[in-house]
Image: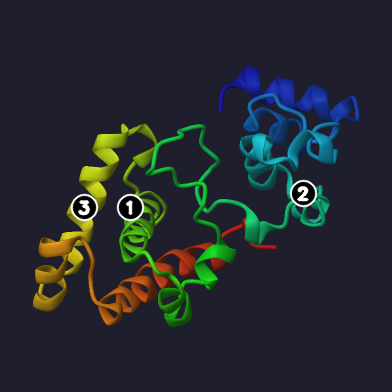
């Protein structure tokens, strides 16, 4: 620490300005919690998701950010990844904790279009790639997302010859293989989410 910095801290202390609060203000990039993170209209709507996440990360020590929004937009209904404006078929906004909980054998049996199930698995692979494996999917184009999702999907099917043969011939896989993939992906994603600061 420089002498100048120590001198500034001493002055702040003598003028009764809480030094730890000032340091927190600096660490937050000179952004305030009060007046922003304590108002539902500023953070709770899905369009304000980036602000909500910033407030959870930086201001939860002084404001119950998640509590403010829980009655308006529950944590289980928020996307696992930050809300994105990308509108293509590989959009990740639909992957929420609530949606993941519903991905089970009954969901598979009730879905008549089996190709849609494969599309759902593709989205889950993209979310896992970014959320768990730190691949920045949000920067990818539609075609790049599709290529990555298919690559991860095919890697996951290695050793499942029946599923590979089925997908190659008709873009679908057996229900048992689908159930296995759903279980693997949702467990990996929810394990991290359950231990994150986003869970209420």
Furthest-top residue in view? 4
Measured in 3D between alpha carbons, the distance from the residue under mark 3 to the one under mark 1, in whole angstroms, is 12 Å
Quarter of the image where the C terminus is located:
bottom right
Q: How is the image coloured?
A: rainbow
- Rate crowding at label 3 as few (under 14), some (14 to 19) or many (20 or more) other CA atoms within 10 Å: some
The relative height of residue 59 versus residue 169 in the rendered view (above or below) is: above
Quadrant for residue 1, please give it.
top right
Query: Which residue in the structure is indicated by mark 1?
Result: 129
Foreground residue, 2 or 130? 130
Q: Nearer the viewer, mark 1 or mark 2?
A: 1
Question: Residue at horizontal 47%, vertical 70%?
Answer: 191
Q: Are marks 1 and 2 in contact (CB under 8 Å)?
A: no
Residue 65 rendering spot, x and y as whole percentages: 77, 49
Q: Is residue 195 visible?
A: no
Q: Are marks 2 and 3 in contact (CB under 8 Å)?
A: no
Residue drawn 49% across the image and 55% down it = 95
Would you place residue 96 above or below residue 5 in this image? Answer: below
Residue for badge 2: 65
Quarter residue 76 falls in: bottom right
Secondary structure found at label 3: helix
Relative horizontal placement of residue 170, taking residue 43 as reference (left or right): left
The disc, 1 or 2, on the residue closer to the chain's N-terminal end is 2
Q: Viewer-nearest of labels 3 and 1?
A: 3
Residue tagged by mark 3?
150
In-front residue for pair 128/93: 93
Seen at 71% across and 27% down, the residue is 31
Residue positioned 51% across, 32% down in the render: 85
Q: Is residue 34 above or below residue 110?
A: above
Front residue of this view, candidates 123 and 53:
123
Report the Cα–Cα distance between label 2 and label 3. 37 Å
């Amino acid at each position: 620490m420089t002498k100048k910095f120590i001198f500034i801290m001493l002055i702040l202390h003598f003028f009764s300005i809480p030094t730890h609060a000032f340091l927190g203000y600096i660490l937050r990039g000179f952004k305030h919690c009060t007046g922003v993170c304590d108002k539902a209209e500023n953070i709770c709507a899905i369009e304000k998701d980036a602000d909500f996440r910033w407030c959870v990360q930086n201001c939860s020590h002084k404001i119950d950010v998640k509590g403010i929004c829980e009655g308006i937009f529950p944590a289980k209904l928020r996307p696992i990844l930050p809300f994105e404006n990308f509108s293509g078929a590989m959009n990740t906004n639909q992957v929420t904790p609530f949606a993941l909980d519903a991905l089970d054998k009954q969901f598979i049996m009730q879905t008549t279009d089996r190709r849609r199930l494969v599309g759902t698995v593709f989205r889950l692979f993209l979310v896992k790639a970014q959320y768990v494996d730190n691949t920045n999917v949000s920067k990818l184009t539609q075609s790049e997302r599709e290529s990555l999702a298919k690559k991860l999907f095919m890697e996951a099917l290695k050793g499942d010859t029946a599923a590979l043969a089925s997908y190659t011939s008709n873009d679908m896989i057996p229900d048992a293989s689908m159930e296995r993939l759903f279980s693997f992906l949702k467990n990996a994603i929810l394990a991290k989410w359950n231990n994150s600061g986003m869970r209420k």
